[in-house]
Image (cartoon, rainbow, N blue to C red):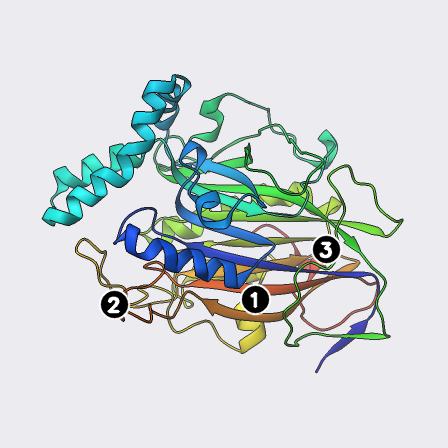
Amino acid sequence: MVTVNAGPAAEVSVVTFNIRGIMDRWPERAPLLRQCLKQADADVFCFQEVLTGEFAQELQLLGPDYRVHDLFGAAYVSTLRALLRFSWTRSLLVSLPESVEAWREQYQLAGNWSRLLRDLAIAPFYGNSIATRLPAAQLEPQQHSKQQPNNSSSSKAAGLAGSTSSWSSCWRSSSSSGSSSNEASDLLVLGDFRAAQRVCVQLRLTPAPGPALPQQADGSSNVAEHLDSSGSGSGDEVALVWLVNTHLDHAAADIRKRQVQAICSWMEPVKASCAGIVMTGDLNAPPDEALHAAMAAAGFLSAHKAANGSEPSFTWPSGIQAPLMDEGEPHCADYVYAWQAPGYQLLVTAAQLCGDAPSDQDPSLYPSDHIGIKVKLQVVASSGSGGSAAGEGAAGGACA
């Protein structure tokens, strides 16, 4: 066991999960996925392939105690979303995704034309999201980034293929830690249907009970204490942690590496004013792919590997059997990475799979076609050194 010089600390649990939208037997697997997320009981859920926004798939699964920061996936979505301003078109568009996919599965319509109909049905809502019960940080402009703000609906839609650009949305918070209303998050466009989002949350670091803290230990507690969204508290230290969520290109390793490099560069300006960064997502990249070396060069550490000595043998496909399921060689596609700032440590206390067990009644039914990863982190304010923890803050340069 590796110990560190103990200082004020807080615990946070994070799950990354590609939930496959409403595809692959959604009416059957929805209760299974809901139970899986309830058991995970994480402070932060980072979803990929989720129907967010007005469809509110996250809140259907999690309930109202989470605040959702949504991210939509393609440029033409901004046009489609304009139709959501009208109640009759909104009702129609919200009803289409499940109806179209149920029709496709009933008749096993796997052709390109039926996939196009599905994509059009889910387009206004399809993307990624971060659902958290932690308060969002109220950041001053100098704490954020120097990007030009844009609060229009198009600022949340991804742009041209192969391009990377950044849009900044206003930070909004409420006095309550839970809300059913969706909020915009910062967006970095990585190409058609590909983007990264980030949200800054604040933790209250409470005094440590003893002189040392374990780097790895079992436990089931969630965030013990945190500030309300106004930033007030009992005088304990406040730490800002950035949450980053993404879904990288599925086709080419060189594109994925460039996308990771863009994300690392995007996060560079905010490192000086935070305690750490937790980056999650469906990276579509086996552990031996070059992007992981790029993450390590930027000071990021894989949480599952830190806690267990290796990445999962696979996180896709889960084992689900569905009429129109995607197929491929099993591999690890999903990751949680962490970076710690100088003066802080992000200690990985546990990392495990979630959603890796089938239904008790049907061995071919899983919560999703991906397996999620749950990570528990301890954020410690400390001037001492304590081994690798969650990467070396001093080495937090841009990706190589």
Residue shown at 43% from the left, 30% from the top: 157
The image position of residue 375, as x and y in percent, is 57, 64
How many angstroms separate mark 3 from mark 2 (CA)?
44 Å
Picture disc at residue 132: none
Instruction: Tell me if residue 276 can be seen.
Output: yes
Depth order, front residue of 372/277: 372
Indicate whether 198 appears above or below 391. above
In screen coordinates, is 199 left or right of 312? Answer: right
Q: Which residue does the numbered mark 1 point to in the structure image?
A: 303
How many angstroms separate mark 1 from mark 2 (CA)?
29 Å
Residue shown at 62% from the left, 48% from the top: 133
The image position of residue 188, as x and y in percent, is 50, 37
Picture disc at residue 364: 2
Q: Secondary structure at mark 3?
A: loop
Which residue lies most toward the top here? 86
Q: Label 3 is placed on what type of residue?
A: Ala
Q: Secondary structure at mark 2?
A: loop
Tell me which numbered mark, 1 or 2, is placed earlier along the sequence. Answer: 1
Q: Which residue does the numbered mark 3 point to in the structure image?
A: 341
Indicate whether 338 appears above or below 147. below
The image position of residue 165, as x and y in percent, is 48, 32
Which corner quadrant of the image does residue 365 belong to? bottom left
In screen coordinates, is 142 left or right of 106? Answer: right
